[in-house]
Amino acid sequence: MLRSIRTRINERAPDLDGAWTALVSGNGDKRALGEVLTAVVAALTDPLSELGRRRNQAPDALAVELTCVLSRLGDTDRRQHLAFGVGGGPVLRLSPDQSWAPILDPTGSTPSLPHHSPDVSWDAFETKPGDVVALCTASTAGLTRNPETGGFLAEQWIDPAPLPRYLWQLNIHSQTSRDDRAAVCLWDLADNGH
């Protein structure tokens, strides 16, 4: 699946970059970028459907949610990102003051690929040195909204942790969340000597 995502993004890279750059510079509209992202996600339905056919599985058996963040490298004071996805996986920002804020917070129904037409949620945003971007499952996002577990994760994740410790932290005991927990964090370390 990752190869398919990379391929579809690469196929639309000129359109994607042009629409994103125009939006950030104030010369574009949100609709143009939304159309490109919808085309990228719609192109993923074919590989998923083909996989189902080869395995003799119904589309529901392969249903996946998708959450992505594209990051522009370069400007270390205000790094640009583009979050997009289908389904209920949110993207959150952890600020240096250890507060969580939603960047992409899908609500309502959670469509999935390949059997739903893509209803792509997206947002362009910036980070500053010290910010952390977390792509996570809805269950993990629920942990960040709980004052106790959200405070614990903020305190632990404000700086990068070795992988075993990070996974241990993600597995924190909580009565409110026993569903699938997954998170990918991106630390903006431009001014932190890393």
Image (spheres, rainbow, N blue to C red):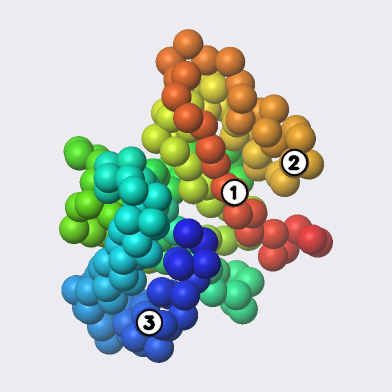
Density class for disc 1 (Cα within 10 Å; few <14, some 14-19, many ≥20) is: some
Which mark is first along the chain, 2 or 3? Answer: 3
Q: Is residue 150 above or below residue 77?
A: above
Inter-mark Cα distance, 1 to 3: 25 Å
Could you say where residue 126 lies in the image, as x and y percent from the top left? 47, 64
Horizontal arrangement in the rendering, residue 111 relative to residue 68 (left or right): left
Q: Is residue 88 above or below residue 168?
A: below
At a point 35% along the width and 52% down the height, the residue shown is 52
At a point 39% along the width and 35% down the height, the residue shown is 138
Inter-mark Cα distance, 3 to 2: 33 Å
> What amino acid type is highlighted by mark number 2?
Leu
Q: Nearer the viewer, mark 2 or mark 1?
A: 2
Could you say where residue 59 lies in the image, as x and y percent from the top left? 27, 48
Q: Is residue 73 above or below residue 93?
A: below
Q: Specify the label residue 185 is tagged with.
A: 1
Mark 3 sits on what residue?
12
At a point 75% along the width and 58% down the height, the residue shown is 192
Density class for disc 2 (Cα within 10 Å; few <14, some 14-19, many ≥20) is: few
Asked which secondary structure carries label 3, the reply is loop
> What amino acid type is highlighted by mark number 3?
Arg
Mark 2 sits on what residue?
163
At a point 59% along the width and 34% down the height, the residue shown is 154
Residue 107 visible in this rendered orientation of the protein: yes
> What amino acid type is highlighted by mark number 1?
Cys
Of residues 44 and 141, the one drawn nearer to the viewer in this rendering: 44
Inter-mark Cα distance, 2 to 1: 11 Å
Could you say where residue 187 lies in the image, as x and y percent from the top left? 64, 54
